[in-house]
Amino acid sequence: MKRLFTFALLTATCVLGANAQLLYKISGKGLSKPSYIIGTYHFCPDTFVDSIPGLREAMRTTEAVYGEVVNDSMMQPEGLQEVQKALMMPEGKTFTSLYTSEEMTRINAFLTKHMGADFTNPMVAQQLDKLSPTALATTMTAILCTKKQGSQLDAAHTIDIFFQNWGKEQGKKIGGLETLAFQIKMLFTRPLDRQAQVFLCMADNEDFNNKVLDLMLEGYFKQDIKMIEESINLKLNNSCDDTPEERAELIDNRNADWLTKMPAIMKAQPTLFAVGAGHLVGEKGVLALLRKAGYTVEGVR
């Protein structure tokens, strides 16, 4: 159960040539030693670490490891309780109460196709009806991605988890750019009507969702940052797309906030930052913001 809640949080937020880059060196602007930033992906096994050029050397030469959050905070009793509460429907409400019978027929077809069970099974319904649409969407994204990779991904051995675990073993400082409470609020507390709409969009647009996931998976394992950016920017051009406000809350505003914290962290000690690859790309991505702030940012090859 602990792994389920942890994996749900990590996955909410479901990437060679000139664009083949996941690891970047940050230097200049008074830094005595360079820091590094690596783009991660929630559905990538930790064995992929040794496929990223220069990463082991970057790990060796840095003295701290910072993630989006401190992973251990999710495994503490209080953290688990916070995550579990966020995944559940509010008291007195159920998942099925958010949909018409016709919409539930479409949702059940989607669930049966990919889970082998749906709300028509009373035992399954008893469990799923307690989950929020965002929580169930997160679970389905995990199922779809692991199917595409052809094997069951071990949630305890993803590349997201790896860096902080390794850092602890090496006695390095471990930190987070955000608190667990902030991430839970940001990821799981959209209005219920919007959560319901987004999940129905997932069930109704399988071809589009497959295209996004295929492009993201191919881009990440090819280490093609441009392909990752392309997958993030794909749109249906309807209400299923994130609004500009939702995009800002999920990515852009967080990137800007991290840039208020990273300079002091890097000045104190050379640091390896491990954050979702989607945060690196674009004009409002962390790489562009670091360059605008006066740092030299170079891909490591």
Image (cartoon, rainbow, N blue to C red):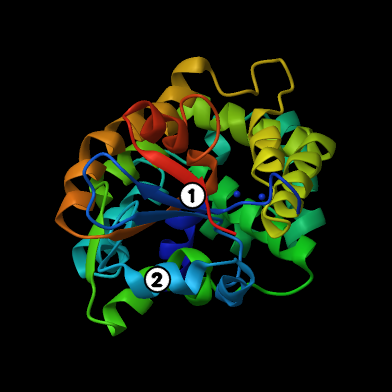
Query: Which residue is more in the foreground, 139 or 230?
Result: 230
Mark 2 secondary-structure assignment: helix
Which residue sits at x=64%, y=17%? 239
Relative placement, left or right, of 75 versus 107 is left
**Residue 18: x, y in percent?**
71, 45
Direction from residue 248 to residue 146 in the image, left or right: right
Label 1 Cα crowd, 10 Å radius (few <14 / some 14-19 / many 20+)? some
Q: Name the residue located 33 percent from the left edge and 55 percent from the top edge.
A: 35
Query: Taking the image as drawn, is residue 116 in sight?
Result: no
From the image, state whether disc 2 or disc 1 is nearer to you. Answer: 2
| Drawn side of residue 125 relative to residue 116, left or right | left
| Element at label 1 | strand
Marker disc for residue 47: none
> In the picture provided, is 297 more to the left or to the right than 141?
left
* Residue 108: percent from left, percent from top: 74, 46
- Residue of label 2: 59
Residue situated in front as seen by the camera: 186 or 276: 276
The residue depicted at 70 percent of the width and 37 percent of the height is 231
Q: Position of residue 75 (x, y in %)?
A: 29, 70
142 or 197, which lies in front?
Answer: 142
- Kindly identify the amino acid type of the residue bearing the numbered disc 2: Met
Three-letter residue code for mark 1: Gly
Q: Where the C terminus falls, by quadrant? A: bottom right
Work out whether 81 lies above or below 99.
below
242 over 74 or under it: above or below? above
Residue 180 is at least partly visible in this image: yes
User: Which residue, given by chain and number where applicable, does mark 1 sit on?
Assistant: 276
Q: Position of residue 291 (x, y in %)?
A: 40, 32
